[in-house]
Image: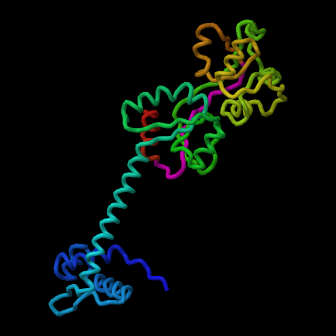
Amino acid sequence: MQMRWPDLDVLELLVGVDDHGSLSAAAKVAGVAQPNASRAMKRLEAQVGAPLLLRRPTGSTLTAEGTVLAHWSRKVLADARHLIDVAAGMRERRAAELTISASMTVAEHLLPGWLGRFRQQNPDVTVHLQVRNSTLVFDDVIGGACDVGFVESPTVPRGLHTVAVARDRLVVVVDPGHPLARRRKPLTIGELARTPLVVREPGSGTRTTLDVALHEYDRAAPLLELGSAAAIRTSVLGGVGPAVLSTLAVADQVAAGDLKVVEVAELHLDRILRAVWRPPRQLEGPGGDLVRMVRR
């Protein structure tokens, strides 16, 4: 029969008897009740098959076998403390790293400023950023591949915690030479639905928001499906066709007159950008620090 490992607590008691001269003194230093200390020592004696204490009315001291075992117990306890120190160091190194998974809009237009401020306040934290669409961000968060995610999707999977960190709005944009740029009346929602658009790939927050808004209407097939807002913006600037993009992605081009916003009557594409994370509800560590900083 294989021998079970002795408890570190009882080894500490054994060493305490050697250091303090009696089991009662060792128990007092260890914060253990005397009866519990006696029972623990009897179990250890049964495990090793040898008497470790000389029990006298004046107190218990070590036998020769107990003295030998106390010597080796010191080594075991020293190694155990070293193990605990190594584990604490690993926790500290992990605490000094932050892995973020962010959707395209947040990663391109908001995170650079957020991370600039965060690095000023936390210079010792190493930040890793993964840029995904919102669906893949959720996968990263659920699978533990990141500490915190930032998404633009209107819905969040059950079981994740979330908080609003910013807002933006989707708008229809065209190049100045497009016929819609000269239109005097706003488009109807149905007209927008029937208009071929340059769109993001399925799974992106921008695509999901648009699809939800137009789900009751017959839709035209997309002109193009592209993997980033930057690629769509370039396509619209090049005259490929209209697109629905975040105001964050087109603000400079609209201000410069390189893109025109086409109004759509009664279509509300305001949206909330969110931080998401796994339980527990209170996000700790650098991820929590970042989210709190952004919300402030």
Identify the magenta region.
264-282
Image x and y of residue 207, in percent: 71, 31
Q: In this view, does 41 lie to the left or right of 220?
A: left
Q: Which residue lies furthest to the left in this view?
A: 58
Q: Residue 63 sits in which quadrant?
A: bottom left
Question: Which image quarter holds the C terminus?
Answer: top left
Q: In this view, does 115 lie to the left or right of 209?
A: left
Q: Which of 31 and 213 is in front in this view?
A: 31
Q: Residue 21 sits in which quadrant?
A: bottom left
Image x and y of residue 166, in percent: 53, 30
Image x and y of residue 50, in percent: 32, 89
Point 62% across, 25% down: residue = 169
Point 38% across, 85% down: residue = 47
**How many circles with numbers are drawn on the protein?**
0
Please check the rendered image and state whether residue 189 is part of the magenta-colored stretch, yes or no.
no
Give the answer, above or below, for where 184 lies relative to 72: above
Q: Is residue 48 left or right of residue 273?
A: left
Image x and y of residue 30, in percent: 25, 73
Point 53% across, 40% down: residue = 163
Chosen colour scheme: rainbow
Q: Which of 80 and 166 is in front in this view?
A: 80
Q: Which of 92 and 218 is in front in this view?
A: 92
